[in-house]
């Protein structure tokens, strides 16, 4: 099975900062990767699919890139409402649809 | 707006069984693959199972294989998760989730609100 890792495990940044989260797959997965945002007490929300396509309604400060085994999620100007845990997940191959362990983002 | 309402959670003793349901509305349920995803307290998201649009293809995480069964009734717009031989490690919030297409290889685009399962003696 393909394993997913994320770094960092957590980060703290100031409002307006640019932050980047990295997700790595143990084998190449082309661009078959999604990013979710999970706020405390809420249901997870799809942010990006196909590694770089923004889901409808997601603010443009979120962006994704990468292919193969290394991917990044970038928030260009961190906002207070972006406090959440962010997960990557691989898809488009036989399950399991493994999630990354998550990256917790908060405001400094 | 997609609606997914999960129910059936509760407190159950180790070794017992529980059946979760998820009522879907505001989309054509029979056209989409569906997932169950869980989150144990203080832990990350764990994919549990997926079922194809027609119910013919199912896949499970190794952690639940042989104990959990995913199924659906397209005439009732309802997804199910039958959980047997429950262990303490199955304590989690269980989310019912929709795929953006019919295939079991796709991701989740909408999540239900979750139902809490607590396994405790």
Image: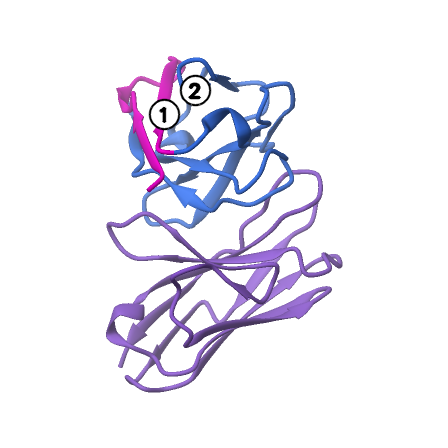
Chain colours: A purple, B blue
Residue B121 seen in the current view: no
Majority secondary structure in the magenta region? strand
B86 or A104, nearer to the observer: A104
Where disc 2 sits, the SS reads: strand
Sequence order check, earlier mark of 1 and 2: 1
Q: Which residue is mark 1?
A: B22
Q: Which residue is mark 2?
A: B80
Q: Quarter-wise, where is residue B31 in the image? A: top right
Q: Are marks 1 and 2 in contact (CB under 8 Å)?
A: yes
Q: Which subunit holds the residue at mark 1?
A: B
* Rendered location of residue A48, percent (x, y): 51, 61
Residue at point 44%, 47% (across, down):
B45
The relative height of residue A39 versus residue B31 in the rendered view (above or below) is below
B84 or B104, nearer to the observer: B104
B28 or B6, nearer to the observer: B28
A72 or B110, nearer to the observer: B110
The residue segment tinted magenta is B1-26
How far apart, in angstroms, are the residues tagged by discs 1 and 2? 6 Å
The lab-note entry on whether marks 1 and 2 share a chain reads yes
* Crowd tier of the residue under label 1, counting other residues whose Cα lies within 10 Å: few below 14, some 14–19, many 20 or above: many
Q: Quarter-wise, where is residue A49 in the image? A: bottom right
Q: Which mark is residue A71?
A: none
């Amino acid at each position: 099975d393909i394993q997913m890792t994320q770094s960092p495990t957590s980060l703290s940044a100031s409002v307006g900062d640019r932050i980047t989260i990295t997700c790595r797959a143990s084998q190449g997965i082309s661009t078959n990767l999604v990013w979710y945002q999970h706020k405390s007490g809420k249901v997870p929300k799809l942010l990006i699919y196909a590694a770089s396509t923004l889901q409808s309604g997601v603010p443009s400060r979120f962006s994704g890139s990468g292919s193969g085994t290394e991917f990044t999620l970038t928030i260009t100007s961190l906002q207070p409402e972006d406090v959440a845990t962010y997960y990557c997940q691989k898809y488009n191959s036989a399950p399991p649809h493994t999630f990354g362990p998550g990256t917790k983002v908060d405001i400094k | 707006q997609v609606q997914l309402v999960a129910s059936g959670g509760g407190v159950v003793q180790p070794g017992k069984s529980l059946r979760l349901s998820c009522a879907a509305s505001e989309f054509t349920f029979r056209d989409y693959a569906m997932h169950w995803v869980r989150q144990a307290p203080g832990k990350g998201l764990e994919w549990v199972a997926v079922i194809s649009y027609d119910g013919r293809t199912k896949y499970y995480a190794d952690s639940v294989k042989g104990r959990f069964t995913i199924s659906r009734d397209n005439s009732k717009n309802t997804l199910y998760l039958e959980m047997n031989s429950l262990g303490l490690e199955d304590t989690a919030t269980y989310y019912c989730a929709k795929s953006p297409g019919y295939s079991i290889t796709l991701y989740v685009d909408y999540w239900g609100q979750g139902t809490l399962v607590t396994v405790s003696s």
